[in-house]
Image (cartoon, grey):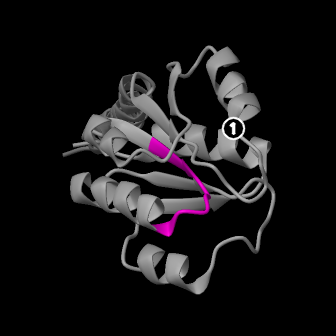
Amino acid sequence: MDAKTVYQTLTNFDSFKSLITTLISMAIAATLTYKIVLFTLKKEVRLFKNLKTKIQVFDPPNKYNKNMQIECDEIDNNPLFNKTIRFSDADPRHRNSIGTKSLIILGYGDDFTFFETIFNKATDYEIPVIIYTYGDSRALEQKHFDLLNKYRWYSVCNTPIRLISDVFTILSTFTFK
């Protein structure tokens, strides 16, 4: 074996090694790109499917003499969300309208029994609940927190912008059954 043959063999081996390294790098890059696109696509599909979710607002009478009409109008005016279904009295029969594909917004009211009834119905279906306190961060009493601490899918909101933010966040991340 002369030097020229050894040099050609080494050059061919070096070229082959470079080719294999390039192909492996391209395969890894293609796999990572595929995984990232698939992950993003799954999140987007979940978001667009969840944006069709029924948003139910339970707005019972309260000590503030406020209602959630402005907040409901803001949600209704947002083209991303479905129109809200608003119940403005403390009739416990409204709990029958709650389903597995619902997002519940429960206004703080004077009647704890109504609060508990709606909240428990939502927990039965394991759907998220947003508690709205009309701007009073200290409105909820210990009995409310005792009830809330038994469930993991709830949020407490004090302001309209936080309410809209929580609605979008929940709809973009929660997996409804």
Left or right: 159 in relation to 27: right
Residue 73 appears in view: yes
Q: Residue 110 magenta-drawn?
A: yes
Front residue of 109 and 81: 109
**Residue 21 quadrant:** top left
Residue 111 rendering spot, x and y as whole percentages:
53, 63
Residue 4 appears in view: no
Magenta extent: 104-112
Callout 1 amino acid: Met
Q: According to the image, label 1 marks what residue?
A: 68
- Residue at 33% x, 53% y: name it: 122
Q: Residue 75 magenta-drawn?
A: no
- 149 up-or-down from 21: above or below: below
Residue 67 rendering spot, x and y as whole percentages:
71, 40
- Residue at 45% x, 25% y: name it: 51
Left or right: 33 in relation to 125: right
Q: Quadrant of the C terminus?
A: top left
- 156 up-or-down from 32: above or below: below
